[in-house]
Every structure is written in C-alpha cells, then in structure tokens.
Amino acid sequence: MNKGFYMVMAAQALSSVADNALLIAAIGLIADLSGPDWMAPMMKWWFALAYVVLAAFVGAFADAFPKGRVMFATNALKTCGCLLMFSYGAFGLAHGHQLVLIFVAYTVVGIGAAAYSPAKYGIVTEMLPPELLVKGNSWIEGLTVLSVIVGTVLGGVLISPAVSAWLMSFEWVDRLADNAAQSAILMIGLVYVAAALCNLLIPDTHAFYPRQETHPAALIRNFTRYVRILWTDKLGQISLAVTTLFWGAGATLQFIVIEWGAQHLGYRLDQASVLMGVAAFGTVIGAICAGRVPLRGALAVLPVGVVMGLVVLLMPAVYAPWAVYCLLLLIGGLSGFFVVPMNALLQHRGHVLLSAGHSIAVQNFNEQLNILLMLAMYSLMLWLGLSINLIIALFGILVACLMLVFIQWNRLNHRAHPELSQMIGQPGHGTALN
C-alpha cells in the first residue's frame, strides 16, 4: 500500500465520521422539534435519493477530474449542508418548515456524498493492482465502518446532556449555538474541514479516461447502458445483487437498532447510538478477517449472508447488556465478512468492463435504490404501528431468503458457464465499451 492510499483512507474516514455524526444530530433536532418517529428514516431516504437521481452524472464527473480534487469539492458541498442544518432556526420559520429545512440540509449532504463515492472507490482501482483489491477494500470498508462507529458514537456523545453542557460552557460555542444539537453540528463541521485538508493531500494518480459526455440525455442513455452491462455480466450481477441487499439492509438496520433500543431496551438516543457503534465495530472485525479471502474465493462467502439474516432473528430474545453487545457484534462481523469480498469482486468486474467512476456510480445507484425501498418499507411499518420486534423478524427472514436466492442464482450461472471462475482477476479496462 502506498502513502497516497493511506491519505485516501484518512480523508474518507473523517468525511464518513462527520456524515454519521450529523445524522444523529439531525435526529436530535427532529426530536427537539417534536417530529414524528418516521421522520428520522425518511431523512436518510432523502439522503439516499441523491445517489439515485445523480447516478447517471457523478461517474462522469469523477472520471473527468483528478479524484482527489473531486473528493475535496464534494466534501466542501457536505460542509455547506452541515452549515445549512446549523442555521435551521435563523430564518424565522415555523417548526414544520424548520423540519423541512433540516431535510433539505441533509439532502445537500447526500448530494455531496453521492458525488464523493465514485471518486473515493474509483481511486482505489487506480492506485492498487487487482491482486490487492480485496486487501485494499478490506482496509477501506473496515475503516468506513469504523468511521460509522466513531461517527454514531460521536453524534450521541455530542448531544448527551453532560457533553453538550460542557460544550456550551465555552463562550464562542454558547454565542453561536442555541441548543445541544446545534453545538454538536458545530463540532461536526470542524470534522468536515479536517477531511477537506486531507483531500488536498491526495496525490494525482495520473489515470486518464476518454473525454466525458456532458449532455444530460446522453449521460442518462450511457448510464442505462452501463447498468445493463453490469447486470448482464454473470459475475457482476451476483456481486451487485449481494452488495445492493447489504447496503439496503445495513441502512435500515441502523434505524431498527435505534428504535429497538428505545422500545425493547428503554435506551435514550445517545445510548442507542452506542448500540449502532457496537454493530459497526463487529463489521470492522469481519471486514478485517475478510482481507484474507482471495479475490478468486469471493463467491465462497455467500452462505455467511444467510447466517447473518438468521442471527438477526435473535434480537427480540435478548435483554441483558452483555447479550445485546455480543449479538450486535456477531451480526456486524458476519455482514463485514461477506460484503468485503463481494465489493472487491464487483469493483474488479466494473473496472474491467467499464471504468472506475462509472462502475461505482452503477453500484451506488442500485444500492441506494434498495436503501430507498427498504427505508420506505420500514417507515411504512412504523406508521402502521407494527412493533419493532415484528419488524426485526420480517427483516431477518427477508435477508436470509434473498441470500438463498442469490446462492442458487450463482450456482446456475457457474453450471451454465464453467469458465467464470477463471475470469476473476483477469486484467482489463473498459472492455465492454470497445
């Protein structure tokens, strides 16, 4: 691994920490404004919507400029969204309109994240050879999930009564912030600034792509073609299906854990955010262990996804803190272990068939589309008044059943095309575009 790769990891970690801490602070703002429970997952829904709407454009944007500079520009946009959320009470709006402004602010952050992601993952394929992609993804994925831990815990700590009171004791914070959530957002903004400084230190990889299309209709037409290419590739379609399911389930599980902590365990928001961090820590452990899986053995981890779905079904049965923590660690560990090889395989096939930026944009489009679907279903179930334990049971069964479908799909592909295993790790770039 070279020094530039480590700088990419540092920039990604700080930006992701800020994203996740801001989500907790935004949930705190919604609670302060007496917003309903379903608003929190719907805010994440708007965040994910940016990935879907902009998917046809962000890949071309990431490939048109040095990816370190793209990461800097998009991180600056995230910072603007953070500032807008901080200023929610500065416009004299009614409470209902302030809630809308918080949604808009987090959507701006989502737009920045949607454009940030193809550059973040695309630069990995530019810096590392195919044989190091699983290891590189293990580091990136592990650090990303570690940043989820730090971010969610940091968000919970910053809005906790003791820490918020300590922050407000500083004159400059008290002068700028009116409440705990605002003081938290102010600190989170400083993390975005630190991420921007790291972005500026990422070296140019000198990877050049053909001149990118700029007409919106042509970009949408080309993107539709890229989606079709990855979904028709016998290796790409399996890894794409698995990662799509994982990220949709992972985003939903964040809110399930918060609600489960409140309903089942009687935790406050800052305490429930620690539970999210425990699950994410398990994902880091799983991701690190997955670094030993060779790229050619990526598909062998598919059954682990079935086990993860079944283990989720145990959540309603545990109450003791040690049992809660152990179970969440296990769920996170299983998810990290099976998604890292799948992510590496998908990036490899995307790089071979398309390009770094466009393949990641296709991946994000599908993953975020599933996040939209699963969060909408979760919000609907909350609106219908279903208990969190019933929601957890439906969630675990759905994940396990879909993973069984993907395993059988993969078997049929290999039965029809025995040469697929030999295609993993083969060199190439943009072969489907020639």
Image (cartoon, rainbow, N blue to C red):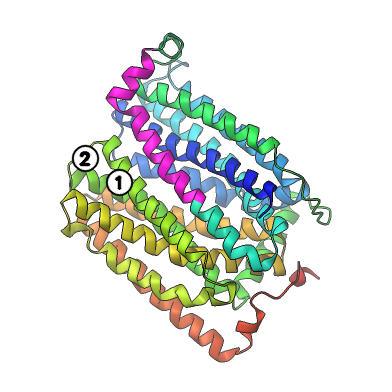
Q: Indicate yes or no whether the magenta region holds residue 419.
A: no
What residue is drawn where x is 30% and y is 46%? 275
Q: Secondary structure at mark 1?
A: helix
Is residue 221 found left or right of 154 in the rendered image? right
Tell me the kind of residue under disc 2: Tyr
What residue is drawn where x is 27% and y is 38%? 271
- Quarter the N terminus occupies: bottom right
Q: Which residues are magenta?
A: 143-169
Q: Secondary structure at mark 2?
A: loop
- State the residue in front, 406 or 372: 406
Q: Main secondary structure of the magenta part?
A: helix
Q: CA distance from mark 2 to mark 1?
A: 10 Å
x and y percentages locating residue 132 in the rendered image:
64, 64
Circle number at residue 267: 2
- Quarter the C terminus occupies: bottom right
- State the residue in front, 285 or 381: 285
Please tell me whether residue 43 is drawn above or below residue 302 in the rendered image.
above
Whether tag 2 and tag 1 are in contact, CB under 8 A, the answer is yes
- State the residue in front, 296 or 35: 296
Tell me the kind of residue under disc 1: Leu
Please tell me whether residue 55 is drawn above or below residue 415 in the rendered image.
above
Circle number at residue 275: 1
Q: Which of the 4 quarters of the picture holds residue 92?
A: top left
x and y percentages locating residue 97 in the rendered image:
41, 26
